[in-house]
Image (spheres, rainbow, N blue to C red):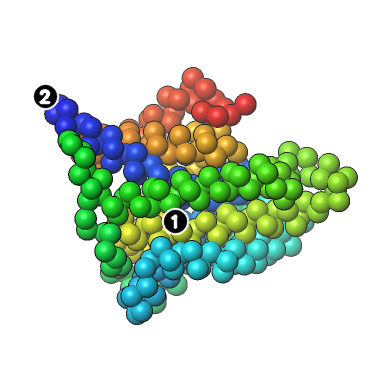
Amino acid sequence: MISFDLLINAIVAGVLLGGFYAAVSVGITISFGMLDIANIAQPAFILLGSYAAYIFNSAFHIDPILVGVVMTPIFFMIGIAVYRLYYYCFEMRNEQAIQGLAFFFGLLFVAEVSLILVFGVDYRFVEAPYIGPSLHFGMFDLPLRMLIPCVISLAMIGALQLYLSRSFIGRAILAVSQDGGALQLIAANPTRIKEIAFGISIATCALAGTFLIIIQPVEPSIGRDYIGRIFAICVLGGMTSFPGMVGAAMLIGVAESITATFYGPSWAPAVAFGFLLAVLAVRPAGLAGR
């Protein structure tokens, strides 16, 4: 018989896990959903954020989340540089399909190999006062190492949603994938708008990377585990919708948590992707798709 207390804790853990999944998926929602750029190297940039947090935490005992916040502008500039290279090599020549995919796969491979050469294959972790303790509320527990990343992730996504809906550049980002030519009529450069949007998508990796190494130790190949998940969450959420993406991340997180709790961790990915296929069979546009 399924324990009710265990079920409640599994659901709570799944919601917190979903908050983390939303953080790692927000970048791909921008690049793939809004810009139509299949950046499969996104997990590599997340890992770079994790290792940046590890370096500063182990050397100077700086809080990993603070490292992520400080690194955000640096990752934004890295994203701009990557997009410029992608644009001049592929998009400007209308070769962004297979060649562009190979480009990002190459980035993923180079980043992984570089991390292995520098740090080896050992797991790395950070130290912070909130990694061990939990909050207890009746029958369920809230581990701070999951709760704090979830709260900050939702705050980051909320701020991005406000920026996209209230600012001129934000609305231009939402429009650029639909009609780049129309943007030129209002004196907006579609290439520059895409550059900013891609920079934002990579900048979110700094925080997502710190969340990852707070939740679990990392090693260079762990990013592969998230490639399928982030694309699945993006598609399930409706491609361009942040609220839909958050809802999809929560559903995937709860499905994985319940499955791992009662049937074993090895079944969790299969059940999560089975859930994705079932939802898309009923609603092909995703939860928030039009």
Residue 49: in sight, yes or no?
no
| Quadrant of image for the N terminus | top left
Q: Residue at x 57, y 37 (%)?
A: 241
* Horizontal side of residue 199 vs 138, given as left or right: right
Classify 10 Å Cα crowding around label 2: few (below 14), some (14-19), many (20 and above): few
Q: Among all residues in the image, which is located at the extreme right?
A: 185
| Helix, strand or loop under label 2 | loop
Q: Residue at x 58, y 48 (%)?
A: 160
Whole-percent x and y of residue 84?
Answer: 70, 63
Residue 174: in sight, yes or no?
yes
* Horizontal side of residue 85 vs 147, given as left or right: right
Whole-percent x and y of residue 140?
Answer: 20, 38
* Horizontal side of residue 93 vs 151, given as left or right: right
Q: Classify 267 as above or below 227.
A: above
| Quadrant of image for the C terminus | top right
Q: Residue at x 21, y 31 (%)?
A: 7
The residue under label 1 is 208
Q: Among all residues in the image, which is located at the extreme top?
A: 282
Q: Sequence-wise, which precedes: disc 1 or disc 2?
A: 2
Whole-percent x and y of residue 239?
Answer: 57, 37
Q: Residue at x 38, y 30 (%)?
A: 274
Q: Classify 270 as above or below 99.
A: above
| Helix, strand or loop under label 1 | helix
Q: Classify 57 as above or below 87.
A: below
Q: Among all residues in the image, which is located at the extreme bottom?
A: 59
Q: Tell me the distance, in whole angstroms, between the alpha carbons under discs 1 and 2.
A: 37 Å
Give the numbered dot on residue 1: 2
Kind of residue at badge 2: Met
Kind of residue at badge 1: Ala
